[in-house]
């Protein structure tokens, strides 16, 4: 294997990450190749540590470590155990926490229903959500999903699943841009949307 083939493998791996196109991935790979400040060594070390230590919380799906599962948010008795905020991915939990407007529990679905990408209800963490609702006795489920078509379809599907239960189902108030996701919203917008949430 020659040098260019090694770089091509790096670029191919980077291009699989969300938001990184093939050209950006190639620029990153080439930049790492002529790295003179040890960035590649630092990156490799950080990736190895993360691979060994970082996990998803067994309960909510948030980012945690091997030593802390369930995560700090799930283990914190001061948080409101009557409400659960359902998000698409763990990074949405980080965004909402940054807003400081919410003190309840979380549940990351790890995606949304997207037939175009071959993702259906079975690919999401919906069964664990239903199990948690039953076991933990939540009184309110907040759907903190994006405003794109896939997120709306996922919200409607969850609404259908819960329609025979006495649970209060709410949705974040307006303020989240149409077609956008939670992770792209600023803390002030998220805080207002959380406080102004509406029943479905």
Image: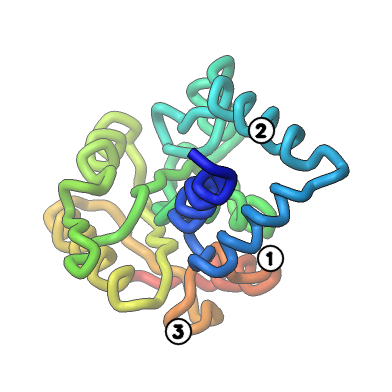
Residue that numbered label 3 is attached to? 178
Q: Which residue is mark 2?
A: 44
Quarter of the figure with the C terminus: bottom left
In the image, 112 versus 164, the foreground residue is 112
Give left or right: position of 24 versus 88: right
Any part of residue 90 in sight: no
* Label 2 crowd (10 A; few <14 / some 14-19 / many >=20): few
Disc 1 element: helix
Q: Residue at x 55, y 69 (%)?
A: 23
| Crowd tier of the residue under label 1, counting other residues whose Cα lies within 10 Å: few below 14, some 14–19, many 20 or above | some
Label drawn at residue 187: 1
Q: CA distance from mark 2 to mark 3?
A: 38 Å
Q: Position of residue 73 (x, y in %)?
A: 57, 34
Q: Is residue 38 above or below residue 145?
A: above
Residue 41's image quarter? top right
Element type where label 2 sits in the image: helix
Q: Which mark is residue 53?
A: none
């Amino acid at each position: 294997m020659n040098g260019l083939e090694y770089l091509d493998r790096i670029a191919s791996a980077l291009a699989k990450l969300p938001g990184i196109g093939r050209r950006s991935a190639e620029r990153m790979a080439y930049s790492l190749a002529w790295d003179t400040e040890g960035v590649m060594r630092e990156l490799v070390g950080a990736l190895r540590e993360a691979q060994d230590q970082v996990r998803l919380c067994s309960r909510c799906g948030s980012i945690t470590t091997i030593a802390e599962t369930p995560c700090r948010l799930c283990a914190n008795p001061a948080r409101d155990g009557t409400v659960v905020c359902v998000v698409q991915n763990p990074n949405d939990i980080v965004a909402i926490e940054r807003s400081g407007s919410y003190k309840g529990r979380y549940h990351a679905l790890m995606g949304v229903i997207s037939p175009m990408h071959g993702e259906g209800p079975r690919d999401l963490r919906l069964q664990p959500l239903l199990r948690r609702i039953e076991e933990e006795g939540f009184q309110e489920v907040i759907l903190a999903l994006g405003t794109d078509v896939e997120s709306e379809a996922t919200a409607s599907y969850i609404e259908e699943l819960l329609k025979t239960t006495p649970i209060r189902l709410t949705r974040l108030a307006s303020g989240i841009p149409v077609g956008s996701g939670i992770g792209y919203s600023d803390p002030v917008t998220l805080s207002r949307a959380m406080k102004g949430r509406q029943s479905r």
